Amino acid sequence: RKEVEQDPGPFNVPEGATVAFNCTYSNSASQSFFWYRQDCRKEPKLLMSVYSSGNEDGRFTAQLNRASQYISLLIRDSKLSDSATYLCVVNTLTGTASKLTFGTGTRLQVTL
Amino acid sequence: DGGITQSPKYLFRKEGQNVTLSCEQNLNHDAMYWYRQDPGQGLRLIYYSQIVNDFQKGDIAEGYSVSREKKESFPLTVTSAQKNPTAFYLCASSASGPRVEQPQHFGDGTRLSIL
């Protein structure tokens, strides 16, 4: 089983739609979680951290379910500019080092 | 502006040649990282460094070497021992390695290809 699993997509949605991505992780000791956005042939950029209580940033909502070991990202009122690959990232502290594990990403294509 | 600068943006390597990728940050971050990204795969960790003059191997360190002589700089050398070096290389930094809540921030990457 992969440490971090995401549906690769693509998710093709019309502008204005609501879309949700899930990500599962295998290491129950993982301690922090992030969503990154990566545009084609560009570097990943931090979209938001994911907190246990869930958190919202504008049209984006992230949630964490530790019991089931998954995190989710909800995008409301999709814009054309939201088209990108969304990377689920899990951070695990092992000894004195933290290790980020990246999912392969879920591709979103928002259309007119 | 604070940030992470990688150079060059594109790099071509001949067979048997070592090449060095540059990564400089002015964010005053302690921890720096090198990743490799291949099509259809997640980022994989090559090496990381939590403090100056110290670094550790990541998951795919074979065929690579690094140094951390200055806090701002973490160059990566792709040696001739790396048989499949064609990939997108990303450098990242974070405020403090052991603190799990600190996200990593990335440079804009170097694309390495074999001639």
Image: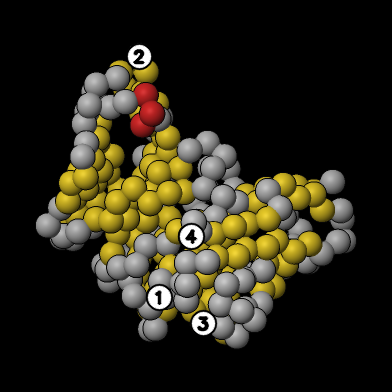
Which residue carries the number 2 mark? A112
Q: Which mark is residue B51?
A: 3
Q: How busy is the neighbourhood of tag 1: few (under 14 within 10 Å), some, or many (20 plus)?
A: many
In what element is the residue under mark 4?
Answer: loop
Label 2, label 1: how many angstroms apart (C-alpha)?
42 Å
What residue sits 46% from the left and 72% below the top?
B29
What residue sits 52% from the left and 66% below the top?
B26
Relative side of A24 to B109, left or right: left
What residue sits 52% from the left and 70% below the top?
B32
Label 1, label 3: how many angstroms apart (C-alpha)?
9 Å
Say whether marks 1 and 3 touch (CB < 8 Å).
no
Which residue carries the number 4 mark? B2
Judge by depth and name the residue closer to the eye, A96 or B26.
Answer: B26
Spot the residue most to the top: A112
Q: Of the residues shown, which amino acid type is indicated by label 2?
A: Leu
Chain under numbered label 2: A
